[in-house]
Amino acid sequence: MPDTYGPPPKRVLFEFQESGGGRWRTNVDIFDRDGAVRHMTMTYRPDGRPTPAENPNTEADSVAVLMPAADVMVVNLGRAKTLGSVRTYTMLPGGNEMIESAAGLNGDGLPFVRTFHFKRVR
């Protein structure tokens, strides 16, 4: 993770729901250490085509999602028609843990990849 990224969030919640017609809806809540909460919702077909975020935030106003395998999701986040970041989510066997690998550019325009691990909350 680049030094300029700052501390990781206190908590992140992902909620994935089938929304019919081959579409999915994902809600993401990021709880920062200072108490702020960032929320993003997207409804999409996992076919790699762009769709607008339902509540754009500083990180993304559009998204493209592809699921090349049942346990892998690739997400391309865009903001103001520029690339924000590319993220790969992988579910581990058993479905209780997920790994996020996120690629982007740091403040100096240099590429980085960072990894977060998530545990399922029921």
Image (spheres, rainbow, N blue to C red):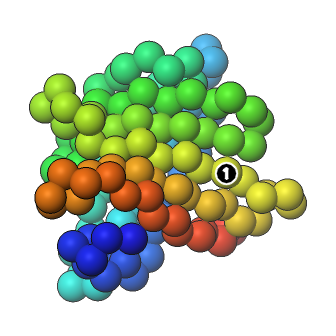
Give the quadrant of residue 17. Answer: top right
Give the quadrant of residue 80. Answer: top left
Image position, residue 109 (x, y; %): 18, 51
In front here: 69 or 56? Answer: 69
Could you tell me which quadrant the N terminus lies in? bottom left
Establish if 99 lies above or below 11. Answer: above
User: Mark 1 — residue?
Assistant: 90
Q: Across the whole image, how many numbered discs are drawn on residues?
A: 1
Q: Residue type at mark 1?
A: Thr
In front here: 45 or 112? Answer: 112
Near mark 1 (Cα within 10 A), the count class, few <14, some 14-19 or many ≥20, is: some
Could you tell me which quadrant the C terminus lies in? bottom right
Residue at image x 50%, y 30%?
Answer: 65
* SS assignment at label 1: strand
Asked whether residue 44 appears in the rendered view, the answer is yes
Image position, residue 33 (x, y; %): 29, 84
Residue at image x 68%, y 29%?
Answer: 68
Asked whether residue 55 appears in the rendered view, the answer is no
In this picture, residue 31 sits left or right of residue 109: right
In this picture, residue 93 sits left or right of residue 28: right
In this picture, residue 52 sits left or right of residue 25: left
Residue at image x 26%, y 35%?
Answer: 83
Establish if 94 lies above or below 36. Answer: above
Establish if 43 lies above or below 106. Answer: above
